[in-house]
Amino acid sequence: MPQKLKYFFYSSKSHVLSIIIKGLFWLAPIVAVTLIVLWIYDNISSLTSFLFNSIGFNIESSPFLWTIFGVLLLGVIAYIVGIFVETRLGDVIEKVYRKIPGYATIKELIDIFNTSKSGEKKVLVVLIRGFAQEGYNIGLMYSTKQSILKDHYTVTLSMTPIPNGGYMFEVHKDKIFVIEEATFDTNLQYLLSMGVKSLAEILKIEPKKLDEFRTLESFLQETKA
């Protein structure tokens, strides 16, 4: 085979392969999300079928519409429960359930992904003094309650790209700066990107100087005011 033809063959093959890989990586998140949505829909459909059939409704003629109705009904119930949990009666019911073995552990695990928490339980994305002599690390505060050490707070540094582990540190409040624009979700995106995307890029903001971030003490004073 002539050298030029061989080069053309291999370059074309490499080009086609790179395009295929690019297409697969573009499709992967779309396929994954679609499968998750279909799985959720199937489970909600099964649940609504069971519930509505058990109270005498025939949903076989329009299962899709009944599923949509079930989702809307679930949203209304969740809204009512969301208001209810802020009441004293909600606290009483939770105290009863906390006596059941395993409830507290499951609730704490679920609460990790709850970004609607407020007050001392609000999840904060923060900057803390880094492992090296200079620089800072981005971490999470799952609670703004003081540590066992006065004026110190617990900060978690998650692993990447699978943030199912990490390290906990007790950090003095003067060394903690709050990234107010960031949330648990945006921090998760940052971790999954393995630094390919900066947090500023994910938040769509310009990089800031350190003194432009609020100290934890200043943030807590305002939230308690």
Image: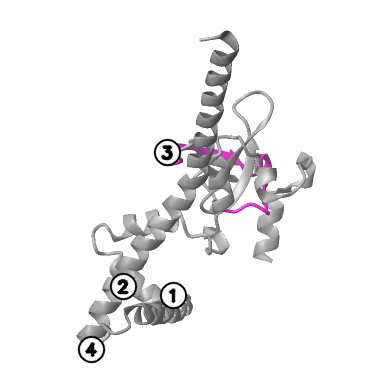
Q: Are marks 2 and 4 in contact (CB under 8 Å)?
A: no
- Residue type, mark 4 in image: Ile
Foreground pick, 220 / 102? 102
Quarter-of-image position of residue 55: bottom left
One can see residue 150 in this view: no
Q: Quadrant of the C terminus?
A: bottom right
Q: Which of marks 3 and 4 precedes in the sequence?
A: 4
Q: Residue at x 46, y 37 (%)?
A: 166
Element at label 1 = loop
Q: Residue at x 31, y 66 (%)?
A: 42
Q: CA distance from mark 2 to mark 4?
A: 16 Å
Q: Which mark is residue 165?
A: 3
Q: Which residue is disc 2 drawn over?
A: 45
Query: Alpha-carbon neighbours of circle 1 within 10 Å: few (<14), some, or many (≥20)?
Result: some
Which coloring applies here?
A: one colour
Q: CA distance from mark 1 to mark 2?
A: 27 Å
Q: Which of marks 2 and 1 precedes in the sequence?
A: 2
Q: Which residue is disc 1 drawn over?
A: 85
Residue 135 position (above or below residue 119): above
Q: Residue furthest front?
A: 2
Residue 144 position (above or below residue 55): above
Q: Judge left or right: residue 211 versus residue 159.
A: right
Q: Which residue is disc 4 drawn over?
A: 55
Highlighted magenta segment, given as a residue range: 163-183
Q: Nearer the viewer, mark 4 or mark 3?
A: 4
Element at label 2 = helix
